[in-house]
Amino acid sequence: MSTTSNHISSISELLSLSDSQYRIYDIGRRVDKISKEQFEKIESAQLPYPFPSQGHAQLAIAFWQKQSTSPYLWFVKFPLDERGLLNQGARNHFIAIIVEALGGDLSVDPTEQQEALLKKNPYHFTPPQYKLAAINSVVSVALKQPASKFYQPAVSYLSGLNGWDAWHDVGVQGLSDVAVRIDDNNNAEMLISAFNQLPEQVLSPLCSALENIALPAELIEKITQRYQLAISDNNSALALSLLRALASSTQHPYSEKFLVGLINSNALSEDTLIIIAGRLWSIFNHEEILFNYLEQLIKGDDLELFAAIFKDLVAIPTTRPLLLQAIRSPNRSNALAHAIGELFKQ
């Protein structure tokens, strides 16, 4: 590969030339798989990045050689341009650093010098613990590997056999493994039975794991009921966690009805508005839902928050056309019209 390394034009090519099998995931918003075909189009600037987060693509790249028992994971963050296309210069710089550090074999254990070079890579980032757990679980299922050693203690706890106070041995990785394997054994039924009993110390990290999974109807019902309870108890932190759990289930009729009702309610906290835009943006599948959200957003008269969320949503390719329609609605309030006017003055 050393003779061709100067001509490598994409990460896809780099991985293929090293005889690696690989999978690509977005981890900026949720954990979402990006197909190889889609990623090649993203890399060649034929396609805007589907899940932009704060002007960047945040990727987990899992790759392995055929003889390998476990994959390597790279976590990389690339800037996007104003059209949502991958910054080609940043991507090329990343490739150059990798080739300089490792040469042709991506699977070698790097020397100290190589390790130092890799650590200097400005595109590398470390995701938060719950995201690391989620991607580890997703990759292990995708490669048909066994769950981590934390899986069984989590199953034992969630089955309720040891009592609900015995949560100290339950790890984030174990909860994530259960969530990703929700269709295995009776895991869905176990979660549904346990849900109302779970203390916040377990429920919050479980919700973070569930945000990457399309959930069954009964579990969605449990989540929405527990949300109402958290609101009545003024437990806003738990309420936000429960909302996030619906992130990959917004298109389910139960979730949609609940979220539309929430958006149409009297007033929402700033944190709730941010969670809806950041995690639950796929609820914006109709102009009316998005329009009502914008009206909610401006109720607090916070033009800075409005501008930040507008910028976030308009960067998402699936949301952008609906957003541009919604801001032209003849039914918009004076406050919304003013906020939009201020936005375009900037």
Image (cartoon, grey):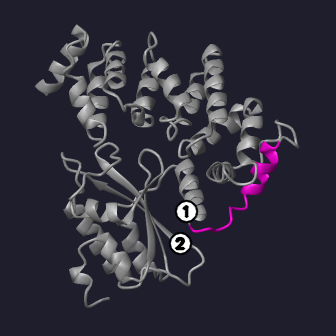
Q: Is 102 placed left or right of 69 in the picture?
A: left
From the top left corner, tell me how far across and down residue 93 is, in percent: 25, 68
Residue beneath the point at 34% across and 25% down? 290
Asked which secondary structure carries label 2, the reply is: loop
What is the spatial separation of the Cα atoms under label 2 and label 1, in whole angstroms? Answer: 8 Å
Above or below residue 84? Residue 9 is below
Query: Quick one: label 2, few (<14), some, or many (20+) residues within 10 Å?
Result: many
Q: Is residue 289 visible?
A: yes
From the top left corner, tell me how far across and down residue 30 is, in percent: 47, 46
Q: Is 257 placed left or right of 201 in the picture?
A: left
Tell me the amino acid under the disc marked 2: Pro
Q: Nearer the viewer, residue 139 or 55?
A: 139
- Whether residue 105 is in magenta: the answer is no
Q: Is residue 122 visible?
A: no
Q: Is 284 placed left or right of 177 in the picture?
A: left
Looking at the rendered structure, which numbered label has been put on residue 175? none
Above or below residue 142? Residue 115 is below
Where, quadrant-wise, is the N terminus in this rendering? bottom left
From the top left corner, tell me how far across and down residue 159 is, in percent: 81, 44
The answer to which of marks 2 and 1 sits earlier in the sequence is: 2
Front: mark 2 or 1: 1
Q: Nearer the viewer, residue 264 or 345?
A: 264
Q: Nearer the viewer, residue 94 or 69?
A: 69
Residue at numbered disc 2: 71
Query: Quick one: label 1, few (<14), some, or many (20+) residues within 10 Å?
Result: many
Report the magenta residues as a range. 143-159
Residue at numbered disc 1: 139
Residue beneath the point at 78% across and 43% down? 158
Tell me the amino acid under the disc marked 1: Val
Residues marked 2 and 1 touching at CB (< 8 Å): yes
Residue beneath the point at 35% across and 44% down? 53
